[in-house]
Image (cartoon, rainbow, N blue to C red):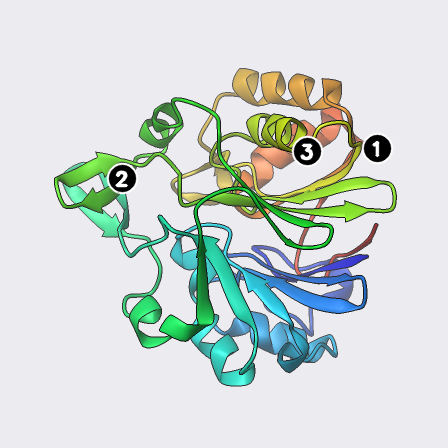
């Protein structure tokens, strides 16, 4: 199994001249002889990075959308133009309704408008835990009261009754059964990375967890150099992660650089950054 970061907020030093970065995430996964794609970043830049790394998006067999935000779904129209076969698995709650609330203004942060309507035959909506193929699982959230985390991050959803606090039911974890244990990918971990890991433990009991990959949504509203939580809260999360039975953790994107630096100090051997161009073998 091999996992490659197609695009992320930063670029690995050895790829500074060749690869793009942006606020978004896209991941290429090679598993059991087939190719998989998780998310497409904010724009078409993930496709340019794939080409620069010698990866052909036409070879992708199956794709997944982690959740219904623009910085993970913005490049799907480009993907569909390059790949005519791959279906995209996403949660049934993934509709065009996600907003960020700041003061009296609501900013749309959802799936590109019209995407689901324009490509209806490319999407497969899930409503429960499923084994997509042998050894590949999609795990929905089971943690209660996720609205509290959404309030902290000012995230809402537009529904028929009006705007409601997001419950992140449009988010899912992608899990592979690797040689050394489970490999978990949850692009933003809106439920909390600790909760995501425990959800997978509950859903797939008795299995070791080898790798956890994803953003931790600790970044502040002003960008990668800001932090939306206190140092004490980040350190508390670090202590929790150190206690959880996970061999390796890779993070980035919405974690933000200040929070990453704190966690890296706490877990120098266990934690690494998942920037554009990062390649992981499992």
Question: Disc 1 designates what residue?
Answer: 269
Q: Is residue 282 above or below residue 231?
A: below
Mark 3 residue element? loop
Q: Is residue 53 above or below residue 96?
A: below
Q: Position of residue 219 (x, y in %)?
A: 48, 38
Whichever of labels 3 and 1 marks the residue nearer the N terminus, that label is 3
Q: Position of residue 99 (x, y in %)?
A: 27, 47
Q: Residue furthest right?
A: 179
Q: Position of residue 100 (x, y in %)?
A: 28, 44
Q: Quadrant of residue 272?
A: top right
Mark 1 residue element? loop
Question: Disc 2 designates what residue?
Answer: 156
Q: Position of residue 196 (x, y in %)?
A: 58, 32
Question: Disc 3 designates what residue?
Answer: 204
Q: Nearer the viewer, mark 1 or mark 2?
A: 2
Q: Relative to residue 264, is residue 109 drawn left or right?
A: left
Seen from the viewer's position, the closer of residues 223 and 38 is 38
Instruction: Tell me if mark 3 has few (under 14), some (14-19) or many (20+) residues whose alpha carbon lies within 10 angstroms of its own.
Output: some
Whichever of labels 3 and 2 marks the residue nearer the N terminus, that label is 2
- Which residue shows up at 51% across the image and 59% down it? 89
Q: Relative to residue 25, is residue 274 drawn left or right?
A: right
Query: From this viewpoint, is residue 229 visible?
Result: yes
- Which residue shows up at 43% across the image and 46% down it? 127
Question: Real-space Cα distance between discs 1 and 2?
Answer: 37 Å
Q: Are marks 1 and 2 in contact (CB under 8 Å)?
A: no
Residue 11, numbered label: none
Question: Real-space Cα distance between discs 3 and 1?
Answer: 26 Å
């Amino acid at each position: 199994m091999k996992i490659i970061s197609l695009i992320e907020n930063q670029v690995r030093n050895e790829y500074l001249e060749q690869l793009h970065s942006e606020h978004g995430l896209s991941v290429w996964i090679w598993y059991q002889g087939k190719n998989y794609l998780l998310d497409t970043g904010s724009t078409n830049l993930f496709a340019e990075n794939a080409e620069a790394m010698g990866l052909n998006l036409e070879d992708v067999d199956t794709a997944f959308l982690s959740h219904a935000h623009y910085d993970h779904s913005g490049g799907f129209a480009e993907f569909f133009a390059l790949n005519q076969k791959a279906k995209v698995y996403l949660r049934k709650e993934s509709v065009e309704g996600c907003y960020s609330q700041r003061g009296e203004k609501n900013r749309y942060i959802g799936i590109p408008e019209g995407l689901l309507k324009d490509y209806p035959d490319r999407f497969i909506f899930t409503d429960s835990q499923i084994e997509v193929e042998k050894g590949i699982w999609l795990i929905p959230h089971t943690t209660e009261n996720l609205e509290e985390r959404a309030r902290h991050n000012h995230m809402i959803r537009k529904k028929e009754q009006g705007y409601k606090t997001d419950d992140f039911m449009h988010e899912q974890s992608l899990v592979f059964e690797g040689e050394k244990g489970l490999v978990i990918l949850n692009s933003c971990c809106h439920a909390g990375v600790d909760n995501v890991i425990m959800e997978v433990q509950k859903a797939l009991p008795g299995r070791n967890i080898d790798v956890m990959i994803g953003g931790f949504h600790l970044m502040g509203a002003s960008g990668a150099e800001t932090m939306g939580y206190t140092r004490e809260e980040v350190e508390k999360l670090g202590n929790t992660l150190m206690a959880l039975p996970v061999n390796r953790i890779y993070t980035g994107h919405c974690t933000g650089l200040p929070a990453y630096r704190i966690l890296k100090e706490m877990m120098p051997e266990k934690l690494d950054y998942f920037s554009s161009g990062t390649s992981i073998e499992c």
